[in-house]
C-alpha cells in the first residue's frame, strides 16, 4: 500500500515588503496563490493538500479557488513561517508518512516536479528529499514522519532549511533539469517573474 503523503502550501505571509497581499497578485488567469494551489491539486502523488493562510485571510478566501484542498488559518503568522508549519502539521491526516512543503509565492514549482520528488521519496523513504534545479536546492521539500516533531519545534523563518542545513547526511536530491523557480517578496521580483514566463500566463492590462 502506498504511503500517505500530505502537501503543505505555506501562504500566510503579510507581504510587508510588497505592500499588498502577494497571494492575490494576478498570474496565469488566476492569482499567484491560486496558481500554486492548482499545481498542488494536480499533483497525483499528493494524497491531500493543506493551505495555510494568515495575512489578508478573508480576502484570500474570497478570491482564491480552494476547491479540493483544505484551508487553515495561522493567527500567529507574524511570528515567522515556523508557526505555519505547526498550524499545517496539526491539520494533516493522522496517517501521513511524509509532508511536502510548497511556497504560496512560488508558482514555478509544477505538479510534474512535485510528483517526481514525492515518488522518489516513496521509493527510498529518506528522511529528507528535495528538488535540485540544475544544482540549486529548492522546493518541494519532503520530510518523513520521523521529523514531524522536529519541524513543529522550530522558530522564526527559514524553518525547514534549518533542518536541511544541520542534517546534510539525511538529505537526498532529485535532479530537475530546469532553472530554479522564482519566488516573490517585492514588486520588482513579481515583475521579473512575469518577464520570465510565457506571455499567456501574464495578466492582462486590466487585471
Image: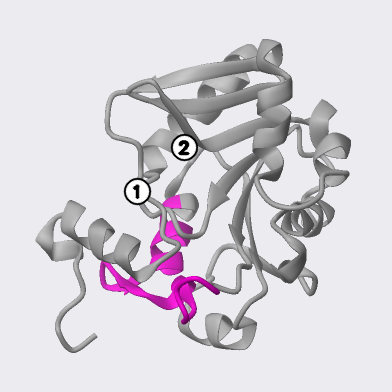
Q: Front-most of 82 and 177?
A: 82
**Measured from the top left, where is residue 12 in percent x and y?**
63, 67
Position of 175 with respect to 119 (left or right) is left
User: Is 107 covered by the magenta stretch?
Assistant: no
- Residue 92, placed above or below residue 176: below
Q: Front-most of 54 and 44?
A: 54
Position of 149 with respect to 137 (left or right) is right
Residue placed at 82% from the left, 44% from the top? Answer: 154
Residue highlighted by disc 2? 114
Give the mark nearest the N terminus, 2 or 1: 1
Tell me the quadrant of the picture where the N terminus can be found.
top right
The stretch in magenta equals 16-39
- Residue 14, placed above or below residue 127: below
**Measured from the top left, where is residue 115 in percent x and y?**
46, 34
**Measured from the top left, where is residue 83 in percent x and y?**
78, 58
- Say whether residue 133 is visible: yes
Q: Marks 2 and 1, Cα distance to the nearest angstrom?
A: 11 Å
Residue placed at 32% from the left, 23% from the top? Answer: 134
User: Looking at the rendered structure, which numbered label has been put on residue 108?
Assistant: 1
Closest to the camera, between mark 2 and mark 1, is: 1
Circle 1: element type: loop
Amino acid at each position: 500500500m502506498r504511503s500517505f503523503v500530505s502537501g503543505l502550501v505555506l501562504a500566510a505571509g503579510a507581504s510587508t515588503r510588497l505592500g499588498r497581499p502577494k497571494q492575490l497578485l494576478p498570474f496565469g488567469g488566476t492569482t499567484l496563490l491560486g496558481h500554486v494551489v492548482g499545481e498542488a491539486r494536480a499533483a497525483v502523488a499528493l494524497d491531500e493538500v493543506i493551505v495555510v493562510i494568515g495575512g489578508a485571510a478573508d480576502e484570500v478566501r474570497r478570491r482564491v479557488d480552494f476547491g479540493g484542498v483544505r484551508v487553515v488559518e495561522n493567527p500567529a503568522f507574524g511570528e515567522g513561517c515556523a508557526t505555519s508549519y505547526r498550524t499545517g502539521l496539526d491539520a494533516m491526516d493522522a496517517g501521513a508518512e511524509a509532508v511536502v512543503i510548497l511556497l504560496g509565492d512560488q508558482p514555478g514549482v509544477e505538479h510534474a516536479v512535485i510528483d517526481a520528488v514525492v515518488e522518489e521519496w516513496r521509493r527510498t523513504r529518506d528522511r529528507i528529499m528535495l528538488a535540485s534545479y540544475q544544482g540549486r536546492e529548492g522546493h518541494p521539500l519532503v520530510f518523513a514522519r520521523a521529523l514531524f516533531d522536529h519541524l513543529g519545534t522550530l522558530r522564526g523563518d527559514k524553518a525547514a532549511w534549518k533542518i536541511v542545513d544541520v542534517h546534510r547526511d539525511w538529505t537526498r536530491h532529485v535532479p530537475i533539469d530546469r532553472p530554479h523557480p522564482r519566488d516573490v517578496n517585492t514588486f520588482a521580483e513579481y515583475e521579473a517573474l512575469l518577464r520570465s514566463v510565457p506571455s499567456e500566463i501574464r495578466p492582462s492590462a486590466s487585471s
